[in-house]
Amino acid sequence: ARPEGPRYVSFYLPPKQISDMLASNSRDSRQTLLAITLSTIVALALVLWWLFRKASAPVASLGNWARNLDRDSLEQPIPDFGFRDLNDFAELIRTGQLSVQEGLEREQAFVRHSSHELRTPIHVMRSNVELLKKLKSQNPETPTSPKEAAVLERLDRASQTMKDLTETLLWLGRDDTGQLPQ
Protein backbone atom coordinates (compact mmCIF):
# COMPACT_ATOMS: atom_id res chain seq x y z
CA ALA A 1 0.00 0.00 0.00
CA ARG A 2 1.13 3.42 -0.92
CA PRO A 3 0.62 6.33 1.35
CA GLU A 4 -1.75 8.98 0.06
CA GLY A 5 -0.57 12.56 -0.36
CA PRO A 6 2.05 14.46 -2.31
CA ARG A 7 5.17 12.72 -3.52
CA TYR A 8 8.46 14.41 -4.19
CA VAL A 9 11.12 13.24 -6.60
CA SER A 10 14.57 14.71 -6.53
CA PHE A 11 17.58 14.30 -8.68
CA TYR A 12 21.02 15.44 -7.76
CA LEU A 13 23.30 17.12 -10.30
CA PRO A 14 26.78 18.15 -9.36
CA PRO A 15 27.47 21.93 -9.59
CA LYS A 16 29.96 21.53 -12.45
CA GLN A 17 27.42 19.72 -14.64
CA ILE A 18 24.74 22.38 -13.91
CA SER A 19 27.05 25.24 -14.95
CA ASP A 20 27.93 23.72 -18.33
CA MET A 21 24.35 22.90 -19.18
CA LEU A 22 23.00 26.27 -18.00
CA ALA A 23 25.64 28.20 -19.93
CA SER A 24 24.93 26.23 -23.12
CA ASN A 25 21.15 26.64 -22.83
CA SER A 26 21.48 30.34 -22.00
CA ARG A 27 23.77 30.99 -24.98
CA ASP A 28 21.44 29.11 -27.36
CA SER A 29 18.42 30.93 -25.99
CA ARG A 30 20.06 34.35 -26.38
CA GLN A 31 21.08 33.63 -29.96
CA THR A 32 17.59 32.40 -30.84
CA LEU A 33 15.96 35.39 -29.14
CA LEU A 34 18.31 37.80 -30.95
CA ALA A 35 17.59 36.19 -34.33
CA ILE A 36 13.84 36.31 -33.75
CA THR A 37 13.99 39.95 -32.58
CA LEU A 38 16.08 41.10 -35.57
CA SER A 39 13.87 39.19 -38.01
CA THR A 40 10.74 40.74 -36.47
CA ILE A 41 12.20 44.25 -36.62
CA VAL A 42 13.22 43.86 -40.28
CA ALA A 43 9.84 42.37 -41.21
CA LEU A 44 7.97 45.14 -39.37
CA ALA A 45 10.10 47.83 -41.03
CA LEU A 46 9.44 46.35 -44.47
CA VAL A 47 5.68 46.17 -43.82
CA LEU A 48 5.60 49.76 -42.57
CA TRP A 49 7.63 50.97 -45.56
CA TRP A 50 5.28 49.15 -47.95
CA LEU A 51 2.17 50.58 -46.22
CA PHE A 52 3.63 54.08 -46.26
CA ARG A 53 4.42 53.82 -49.98
CA LYS A 54 0.99 52.38 -50.75
CA ALA A 55 -0.80 55.16 -48.83
CA SER A 56 1.40 58.13 -49.74
CA ALA A 57 1.38 57.67 -53.51
CA PRO A 58 -2.39 58.23 -53.92
CA VAL A 59 -2.30 61.19 -51.49
CA ALA A 60 0.52 62.78 -53.50
CA SER A 61 -1.43 62.11 -56.68
CA LEU A 62 -4.51 63.80 -55.19
CA GLY A 63 -2.39 66.81 -54.21
CA ASN A 64 -0.99 67.14 -57.75
CA TRP A 65 -4.46 66.79 -59.24
CA ALA A 66 -5.88 69.48 -56.93
CA ARG A 67 -2.99 71.88 -57.66
CA ASN A 68 -3.50 71.53 -61.42
CA LEU A 69 -7.27 72.10 -61.40
CA ASP A 70 -8.42 74.73 -63.85
CA ARG A 71 -11.61 75.60 -65.70
CA ASP A 72 -11.14 72.83 -68.30
CA SER A 73 -10.10 70.06 -65.90
CA LEU A 74 -13.11 70.75 -63.64
CA GLU A 75 -15.35 69.42 -66.41
CA GLN A 76 -13.38 66.16 -66.74
CA PRO A 77 -14.18 63.13 -64.57
CA ILE A 78 -12.23 62.68 -61.35
CA PRO A 79 -9.40 60.13 -61.58
CA ASP A 80 -9.48 57.08 -59.30
CA PHE A 81 -7.06 57.56 -56.40
CA GLY A 82 -7.36 53.98 -55.15
CA PHE A 83 -9.13 54.77 -51.88
CA ARG A 84 -12.80 55.63 -51.45
CA ASP A 85 -12.02 58.38 -48.93
CA LEU A 86 -9.55 60.04 -51.31
CA ASN A 87 -12.07 59.81 -54.16
CA ASP A 88 -14.72 61.39 -51.91
CA PHE A 89 -12.28 64.14 -50.93
CA ALA A 90 -11.46 64.77 -54.61
CA GLU A 91 -15.18 65.07 -55.36
CA LEU A 92 -15.52 67.54 -52.48
CA ILE A 93 -12.63 69.61 -53.87
CA ARG A 94 -14.11 69.53 -57.37
CA THR A 95 -17.59 70.50 -56.12
CA GLY A 96 -16.15 73.39 -54.12
CA GLN A 97 -14.13 74.64 -57.09
CA LEU A 98 -17.18 74.38 -59.37
CA SER A 99 -19.21 76.37 -56.86
CA VAL A 100 -16.54 79.07 -56.69
CA GLN A 101 -16.29 79.12 -60.49
CA GLU A 102 -20.06 79.48 -60.88
CA GLY A 103 -20.10 82.27 -58.30
CA LEU A 104 -17.38 84.14 -60.16
CA GLU A 105 -19.22 83.74 -63.45
CA ARG A 106 -22.47 85.02 -61.87
CA GLU A 107 -20.60 87.96 -60.36
CA GLN A 108 -19.01 88.85 -63.70
CA ALA A 109 -22.37 88.57 -65.47
CA PHE A 110 -23.93 90.83 -62.82
CA VAL A 111 -21.22 93.43 -63.28
CA ARG A 112 -21.62 93.34 -67.08
CA HIS A 113 -25.40 93.68 -66.89
CA SER A 114 -25.54 96.15 -64.05
CA SER A 115 -22.95 98.51 -65.46
CA HIS A 116 -25.41 100.15 -67.84
CA GLU A 117 -28.41 99.69 -65.55
CA LEU A 118 -26.71 101.46 -62.63
CA ARG A 119 -25.03 104.21 -64.59
CA THR A 120 -28.08 105.35 -66.56
CA PRO A 121 -30.33 106.38 -63.64
CA ILE A 122 -27.42 108.03 -61.86
CA HIS A 123 -26.54 109.93 -65.02
CA VAL A 124 -30.17 111.05 -65.36
CA MET A 125 -30.17 112.28 -61.75
CA ARG A 126 -26.87 114.11 -62.19
CA SER A 127 -28.04 115.70 -65.44
CA ASN A 128 -31.31 116.89 -63.90
CA VAL A 129 -29.54 118.34 -60.87
CA GLU A 130 -27.22 120.26 -63.20
CA LEU A 131 -30.23 121.34 -65.29
CA LEU A 132 -32.04 122.64 -62.18
CA LYS A 133 -28.96 124.59 -61.15
CA LYS A 134 -28.65 126.05 -64.63
CA LEU A 135 -32.32 127.01 -64.70
CA LYS A 136 -31.98 128.69 -61.31
CA SER A 137 -28.92 130.61 -62.47
CA GLN A 138 -30.69 131.78 -65.69
CA ASN A 139 -33.75 133.01 -63.81
CA PRO A 140 -32.35 134.81 -60.78
CA GLU A 141 -35.59 136.76 -60.34
CA THR A 142 -37.46 133.58 -59.37
CA PRO A 143 -37.16 133.36 -55.62
CA THR A 144 -35.60 130.18 -54.26
CA SER A 145 -36.53 129.15 -50.80
CA PRO A 146 -33.79 127.91 -48.46
CA LYS A 147 -35.56 124.57 -48.29
CA GLU A 148 -35.45 124.17 -52.08
CA ALA A 149 -31.77 125.04 -52.10
CA ALA A 150 -31.06 122.51 -49.33
CA VAL A 151 -33.00 119.79 -51.16
CA LEU A 152 -31.15 120.52 -54.40
CA GLU A 153 -27.81 120.44 -52.57
CA ARG A 154 -28.65 117.08 -50.88
CA LEU A 155 -29.69 115.63 -54.25
CA ASP A 156 -26.44 116.85 -55.77
CA ARG A 157 -24.29 115.32 -53.00
CA ALA A 158 -26.23 112.02 -52.93
CA SER A 159 -26.09 111.58 -56.69
CA GLN A 160 -22.36 112.37 -56.74
CA THR A 161 -21.76 109.82 -53.94
CA MET A 162 -23.82 107.20 -55.83
CA LYS A 163 -21.86 107.91 -59.00
CA ASP A 164 -18.52 107.56 -57.22
CA LEU A 165 -19.55 104.37 -55.39
CA THR A 166 -20.97 102.79 -58.53
CA GLU A 167 -17.84 103.54 -60.54
CA THR A 168 -15.66 102.13 -57.76
CA LEU A 169 -17.75 98.95 -57.43
CA LEU A 170 -17.83 98.44 -61.18
CA TRP A 171 -14.09 99.00 -61.38
CA LEU A 172 -13.53 96.40 -58.65
CA GLY A 173 -15.63 93.90 -60.59
CA ARG A 174 -13.74 94.33 -63.86
CA ASP A 175 -11.46 91.61 -65.25
CA ASP A 176 -8.91 94.21 -66.26
CA THR A 177 -7.31 95.44 -63.05
CA GLY A 178 -4.97 97.94 -64.64
CA GLN A 179 -4.00 101.33 -63.28
CA LEU A 180 -6.82 103.51 -61.98
CA PRO A 181 -7.28 106.86 -63.71
CA GLN A 182 -6.03 109.67 -61.46
Image (spheres, rainbow, N blue to C red):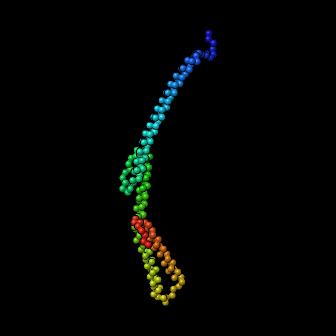
Q: Is residue 17 above or below residue 99?
A: above
- Front residue of this view, candidates 43 and 159: 43
Q: Would you say 27 lies left or right of 117 here? A: right
What residue is drawn where x is 40% and y is 71%? 116
Q: Identify whether 128 is placed above or below 171.
A: below
The foreground one among 123 and 69 is 69
Q: Nearer the viewer, residue 27 or 56?
A: 27
Residue 19 visible here: yes
**Position of 16 relative to 94 (above/below):** above
Quadrant of the rendered structure where residue 57 is? top left
Which quadrant does the C terminus fall into?
bottom left
Task: Using residue 54 as the reference point, say whether residue 3 is left or right of it.
Answer: right
Question: In this rendering, is residue 123 above or below 3?
Answer: below
Q: Where does residue 110 sit, x and y in percent of width and height?
A: 41, 66
Residue beneath the point at 56% across and 20% down: 19
Q: Residue at x 41, y 52 (%)?
A: 66
Q: Could you say where residue 55 lies in the image, as x and y percent from the top left?
A: 43, 43
The residue most toward the bottom is 141
The picture places residue 6, in percent across and down from the top left corner, at: 62, 17
Residue at the spot x=44%, y=71% of the render?
167
Tell me if I can see residue 114 in this picture. Answer: no
Residue 95's x, y, as percent?
42, 54
